[in-house]
Amino acid sequence: METDPSARTGGIEPDASNMAAAVDGLRRLQGVQGTLAGARKISESALDSFYGVARELYANGHYAEALQSFELLCLYEHDNVRNWHALGVCRQVTGDYGGAAAALTFAVDQFDDTAPGLRLALAECLILCGALAAAGNVLGEIVANDDTLNERERGKVKLLESRLTEPGRES
């Protein structure tokens, strides 16, 4: 079930969404195929190594440095869902819920074969932003494909659904 991206984010348009605009600009300059990394002749192994360093920075609590690394990875390799997912999670942990939602929405919209974990992360960010209706839409998409969820993912869906109906929360 396709959902309008603006409905998914609850109309959130943070400054961080400028990255998506930058990627769109890169696509126009390079055509649909190709990445900035490809144009600069940066190897896949170099990008994987850089991702590994960014992930270690994140794992060790160096979120600001990890955030810069994930942003660069998204610009250099905009067609890799892993980079966008990591960027969204890193923005979330730094409290930039709108920026996290923008990165995760971009990933969900650009990659048809996204795992439920990506949509769950998006729903969580939307709840943290207060965009409850949009979070409900994303959770509805996840539940519609319930046969692909594992037990942990089903538990996360139930937890997030309960947060949608907590007293004092409004859309």
Image (tube, rainbow, N blue to C red):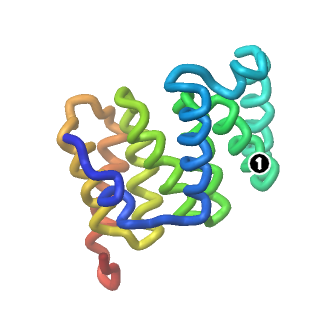
How many numbered markers are drawn? Answer: 1
In front here: 52 or 147? 52
- Disc 1 is placed on an element classified as helix
Location of residue 107 with respect to 5 vertically, above or below:
above
Left or right: residue 15 compared with residue 150:
right
Residue identified by numbered label 1 = 68
Q: In the rendering, at what x and y percent does residue 126 appear?
A: 42, 62
Who is closer to the viewer here, 26 or 54? 26
118 up-or-down from 123: above or below: above
Question: Residue at the front extreme?
Answer: 29
Indicate the position of residue 168 as horizontal and vertical percent values: 33, 85
Please state, as top left, top right, bottom left or bottom right, where the C terminus lies in the image.
Answer: bottom left
Which residue is at 23% across, 42% downward? 2
Q: Quadrant of residue 74?
A: top right
Which of 37 and 59 lies nearest the eye of the viewer? 37
Q: Residue at x 39, y 41 (%)?
A: 109
Q: Quadrant of residue 11?
A: bottom left
Establish if 8 lies above or below 51: below
Residue 6 position within the rendered picture, expressed as x and y whole percent measured from the top left: 35, 58
Does any portion of residue 26 appear in the rendered image? yes
| On-image quarter of the N terminus | top left
Q: What kind of residue is marked 1? A: Gln
The quarter holding residue 28 reads top right
Image position of 99 (left or right of 164): right
